[in-house]
């Protein structure tokens, strides 16, 4: 059988493309090297809880077109991301808001909070922030930087804050209100029944082969289709011939606890340098601690997240978008553009830190051009 499209990877980009191609009357084969569909948004059920196996995924978007598209495949609950920061046992609100400023400085009004930040900004004497440390201090002052940003960021990226570009932290939500909604997006939530079910709905009626490593069987698989949609790492596709792009990886330690509540929140970030993990996720709170029938769940599942430097064999999570890697990616992009039969897409195919809604938007845009 010859297919119109071979889609490599069953994550969001691959699943959206495959769905749209089939809808356009094309024949599609999806392959994935993992034993499951859904890529990094894969959720599996443990003790009635949908566990986010590859890290917490909270869907949020201001893009109405994307929201209307994805809600065809799942109903979303009204989960709002309100993480908590734990600094050596002191708890602070994330995003940085009036609760954070009150706990940090005892200030009560937005005016007082603003004055305190301004005072610390002036003390630091930063005019044009040259790195992440200077950018953070100019946004929220030195106290918040030292307690709530520095340790977490250095664990996350494995680099000193002075060696990280300022733009990484430009999106940091800082509010002079008591709003605990981290994303403040128009649409947000978690798919009822988990992300795997949502992706299964996207791939309904499409042939999927799991445990199939495309790069190991490239010649045979390429022969099966007129075109390939590749969502794996772009440098791996070209056998790393120009060198290896850098990523940060994440390791998870997940355990089931015989108690109904471990930390009372879906996400708690550990912002001191000494705690080896960056955060603990308690998965049941993404669905308000209830099962599908609205019953309270007697147990809980937690995951500790450890950030690490990526090495071959690890799962690549975050592209290290600095100058050196940007220049190397640009060279790989030239090779990719020269491939007439292959479309490169998604976080790894485009070496880009993508939110889920942007991945879906990017896939839909490609479908409009291609189909």
Image (cartoon, helix red, strand yellow):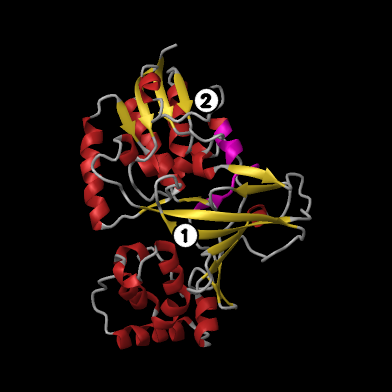
For the residue labelled by badge 1, is the local secondary structure a helix, a strand or a loop? strand
Region in magenta: 186-200
Give the number of the disc on residue 208. 2
Against 57, is 12 above or below? above
Work out which quarter of the rendered image holds the C terminus and state it: top left
Q: Is residue 159 or residue 101 the one in the foreground?
A: 159
Q: Position of residue 214 (x, y in %)?
A: 42, 29
Q: Position of residue 236 (x, y in %)?
A: 34, 38
Give the number of the disc on residue 307. 1
Rate crowding at label 2 as few (under 14), some (14 to 19) or many (20 or more) other CA atoms within 10 Å. Answer: some
Examine the rendering and report whether any part of residue 66 can be seen: yes
Rendered image quadrant of residue 133? bottom left
Against 272, is 119 above or below? below
Residue at horizontal 44%, vertical 58%? 308
Against 264, is 116 above or below? below
For the residue labelled by badge 2, is the local secondary structure a helix, a strand or a loop? strand
């Amino acid at each position: 059988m010859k297919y119109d499209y071979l889609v490599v990877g069953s994550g969001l980009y691959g699943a959206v493309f495959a769905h749209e191609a089939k809808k356009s009357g094309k024949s599609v084969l999806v392959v994935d090297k993992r034993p499951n569909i859904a890529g990094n948004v894969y959720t599996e059920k443990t003790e009635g809880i949908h566990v986010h196996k590859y890290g917490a995924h909270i869907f949020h978007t201001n893009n109405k077109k994307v929201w209307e598209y994805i809600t065809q495949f799942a109903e979303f609950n009204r989960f709002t991301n309100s993480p908590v920061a734990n600094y050596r046992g002191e708890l602070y609100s994330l995003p940085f808001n009036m609760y954070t400023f009150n706990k940090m400085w005892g200030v009560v009004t937005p005016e007082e909070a603003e004055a305190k930040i301004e005072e610390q900004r002036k003390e630091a004497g930063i005019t044009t922030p040259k790195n992440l440390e200077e950018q953070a201090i100019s946004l929220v002052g030195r106290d918040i930087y030292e307690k709530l940003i520095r340790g977490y960021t250095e664990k996350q990226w494995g680099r000193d804050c002075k060696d990280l570009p300022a733009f990484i932290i430009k999106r940091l939500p800082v509010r002079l209100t008591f709003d605990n909604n981290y994303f403040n997006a128009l649409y947000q939530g978690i798919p009822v029944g988990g992300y795997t079910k949502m992706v299964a709905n996207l791939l309904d009626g499409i042939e999927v082969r799991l445990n199939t490593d495309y790069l190991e069987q490239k010649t045979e698989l390429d022969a099966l289709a007129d075109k390939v949609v590749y969502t794996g790492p772009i440098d791996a596709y070209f056998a790393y011939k120009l060198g290896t792009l850098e990523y940060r990886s994440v390791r998870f330690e997940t355990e089931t606890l015989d108690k109904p509540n471990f930390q009372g929140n879906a996400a708690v970030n550990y912002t001191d340098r000494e705690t080896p993990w960056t955060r603990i996720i308690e998965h049941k709170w993404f669905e308000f601690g209830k099962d599908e029938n609205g019953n309270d769940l007697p147990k809980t599942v937690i995951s500790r997240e450890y950030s690490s430097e990526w090495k071959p064999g690890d799962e690549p999570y975050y592209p290290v978008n600095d100058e050196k890697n940007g220049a190397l990616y640009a060279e790989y992009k030239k090779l990719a553009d020269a491939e007439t039969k292959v479309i490169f897409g998604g976080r790894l195919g485009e070496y880009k830190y993508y939110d889920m809604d942007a991945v879906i938007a990017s896939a839909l845009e490609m479908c409009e051009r291609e189909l």
